[in-house]
Every structure is written in C-alpha cells, then in structure tokens.
Amino acid sequence: MESTPMPEPLRRATHQLVSEAVANCQEVLRYTEPDQAHTWKRMTLYRATDAADTMNMVAMLIAAYCQHTGMGRESLEAYLQLEQQHDRAKGPDDGDWAHLAGLLGEDAPVAASEPGTWASMQFRSGQRHALNAQKVEDDPARLFTEAVLHGLKARLCDDVASLDSYLPPHVAELARKVASVLEEPQPATA
C-alpha cells in the first residue's frame, strides 16, 4: 500500500468537517434531554442528518481525491462500503421498523418473522438495545463520550454553567471536568 500522507489542505478540510459533525452529534445528545420535550423530534432529526451529511461530505471529498490520484473504481467502492449505504430519502425500511419494535418491546413485525433476514436481525438488535438500556449504570465508555462532547461544546461556547441545567448530575460532573482542562483553541502554527 502507498504510504504518502494526506495532502495538508485535504487534512485540514477533513478536520474541519469532522469537528462540525461532532458538534452536530453533541446537539443530538443535547436534544434527548427531558427539558427538550417540546422540540426533541424535530431537532434530533435535524442534527442527526446534519452530522450524517457532513460525514458523507468527508467520505466523498476523500473519495474524489483517491479517484483523482488514480484509485481504481473497484477499490474505491469497496472502501466506501457501498453495500451498507442506506438512503434515508426512502424513509424507514423493514429493518428500521423491526429494530424499533424490538427496542420498544413490541411484537416482531411480519418482515422480521423469518429467521436470518435483515429485519429479524434488526429486531433482535433492538431487543438487545432495550435490555442494555434497563441497566442502572451506564457503560463508562458511552458516558465518557457524552461527557467529552458536552464538555467540549460548553467550553467552545464559554457556557460551562449550562451543563448543570440539562444533564444528569454524573454526566454534568464529568463534562465540567472535561471543560475545565480544555484551553481556548489556538491557531495552528505552520
């Protein structure tokens, strides 16, 4: 495999877009909190799709560069994992409905009744997510990720005090710790 580094302008654009996507992911988490009951449906969908679109821009920008520098179509398609592509313009599919039914503890939809199908696997995945959500203590890695996202956003917005108003106390405490160690971003030196 080739070992040339990513060109600096592409690297910077990638970093900028990933930072934007992470900010959108933090807002998805923010809008799941109880004080956002009036707007969570709209805003979680907006921010989740914003994050997905931004990460898609990253993938397409890098793919364009790879194609520009001579990568073959077969390799490019394999790296882009096209078989995993899910077109949200079509709306939820059988697998999404099955996952939701499993998550909500409902009966499996007809599409999930045949073992080994995508929908039946998604139904079981939803059931596992529901079971894991019942645990009193959250996964430390997930809590840390949430705290980092919230702490970073609070520091960037210079609004660390807001963490106490909407987060569970244990997440807010960790987010404050994260925010406290972050310094104001400094421009990169060439």
Image (spheres, helix red, strand yellow):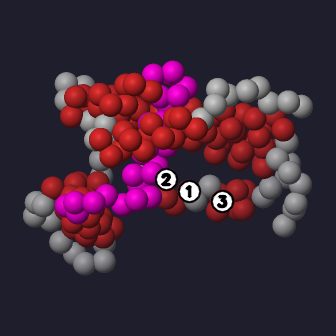
Image quarter in which the C terminus is found: top right
Q: Are marks 1 and 3 in contact (CB under 8 Å)?
A: no
Taking the view exactly as shown, the residue that stands out farthest to the top is 158
In the rendered image, is residue 152 in sight? no
Res. 56 mark: none
Determine the residue positioned at 52% across, 60% down: 83
Left or right, 93 with reference to 58: left
Helix or strand or loop: what does disc 3 sit on? helix
Does the magenta portion include 158?
Answer: yes
Q: Main secondary structure of the magenta part?
A: helix
- Kind of residue indicated by mark 3: Tyr
Q: Estimate the spatial distance between the alpha carbons at disc 1 and disc 3, rounded to whole Å.
A: 8 Å
Q: Are marks 2 and 1 in contact (CB under 8 Å)?
A: yes
- Kind of residue indicated by mark 1: Leu
Determine the residue positioned at 56% across, 56% down: 82
Image quarter in which the N terminus is found: bottom right
Q: Position of residue 40 (x, y in %)?
A: 26, 31
Helix or strand or loop: what does disc 2 sit on? loop
Left or right, 59 with reference to 172: right
Q: Nearer the viewer, residue 134 or 170?
A: 170
Give the magenta part as a residue range. 134-159
Determine the residue positioned at 49% across, 53% down: 85
Q: Estimate the spatial distance between the alpha carbons at disc 3 and disc 2, rounded to whole Å.
A: 12 Å
Residue identifier under label 2: 85
Q: Earlier in the sequence, mark 3 or mark 2?
A: 3
Q: Estimate the spatial distance between the alpha carbons at disc 2 and disc 1, rounded to whole Å.
A: 5 Å
Residue identifier under label 3: 79
Residue 92 drawn above or below residue 72 = above
Helix or strand or loop: what does disc 1 sit on? helix
Res. 82 mark: 1
Determine the residue positioned at 36% across, 39% down: 172
Mark 3 crowdedness (10 Å alpha carbons): few <14, some 14-19, many ≥20: few
